Image (cartoon, rainbow, N blue to C red):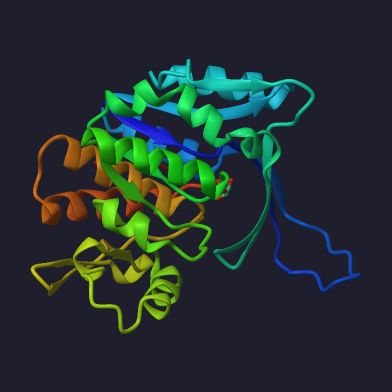
Amino acid sequence: MITVLGSINMDLVTSTDKDPDWGETVIGSQFHTNFGGKGANQAVAAAKLGAKVQMIGAVGNDAFGQDYLEHLKQYGIKTEHIQTIQNERTGVAAITLHNEENKIIVVPGANAHVTPEVVEKHKEAIQQSEWLLLQLEIPAESVNKAIEIAHATGTKVILNPAPFQPIPQTWIEKLTYLTPNESEANQLLKQYSGNKFNLQDKLIITKGEKGVTFYQNEQENHIPAPKVKAVDTTGAGDTFNGALTTALAEGTTLKEACEFASKAAAISVTKLGAQTGMPAREEL
Ligand code: RIB
């Protein structure tokens, strides 16, 4: 079983040929409401690839929240550890797509209610899982709590440090892998420059169309990304993380898991929306 602890957002996506300046109005080309949030995206990516997944998180008591719970259930994701917060909205992400790139503003809403107490309440879910997958769109104290619970019971932990914030050394010691993108990796390495303990062998750095770099026994390894025509890169990192965890949970080597996840992420960018392009197992 894989437990994903993290954010659940509805993505409000506007495509535009012109990125407006502050104070300027432009006419966009398309608008979509998509299921998103780094946590839920990673859960869906893993479930689509055949993993057994449960999610810990929160939605608001609004239409987005109810739709989202139904959506997750359709993929067989266990939702009983997702709380519905009264008088709160489901998290939203305002996304602008322009020239195959995105800008994202997340308003956490119910995600901010995923407190350490909530994590404690659902700790058995973490303890009974082989893998715990985390990101940084819920409060940092809750991520800390989950890492401690997982570490105490031997549950392996992958942290996708997005959106980036400094990562405490006490976390790094307990993590199995860290999966930053290039800019997050640069910030992380800056934070730990000169530090003796081995951060490198835990790093799996996603580099978009350039592929993925991972380290084993202090050796750098690189896997190039398959060539695809990108339509929307939103959620590519999430697809990578969900697929990586799925493969590792099946007992593959790290190299095989990175290859599998790289392919899944490449396919995911060929369709609009964070989750729409995530491949099913047969497609991969
Ligand atoms: O990683 C992509 C996700 O980031 C989007 O789905 C959006 O909700 C934000 O959380």
User: Can residue 275 be seen in the rendering of this structure?
Assistant: no
The image position of residue 128, as x and y in percent, is 27, 23
Residue drawn at the location 51% of the way across and 55% of the way down: 232
Q: Quadrant of residue 89?
A: top right
Q: Quadrant of residue 201?
A: bottom left
Q: Is residue 111 above or below residue 144?
A: above
Point out the image quarter for the N terminus: top left
User: Can residue 80 be seen in the rendering of this structure?
Assistant: yes
Residue drawn at the location 61% of the way across and 38% of the way down: 9
Residue drawn at the location 37% of the way across and 51% of the way down: 159
From the viewer's side, name the closer residue of 217 and 196: 196
Point out the image quarter for the C terminus: top left
From the viewer's side, name the closer residue of 114 and 14: 114
From the viewer's side, name the closer residue of 87 and 116: 116
Residue at the extreme right: 23
The image position of residue 32, as x and y in percent, is 67, 41
The image position of residue 120, as x and y in percent, is 46, 28
Does 224 sit left or right of 148 as displayed? Answer: left
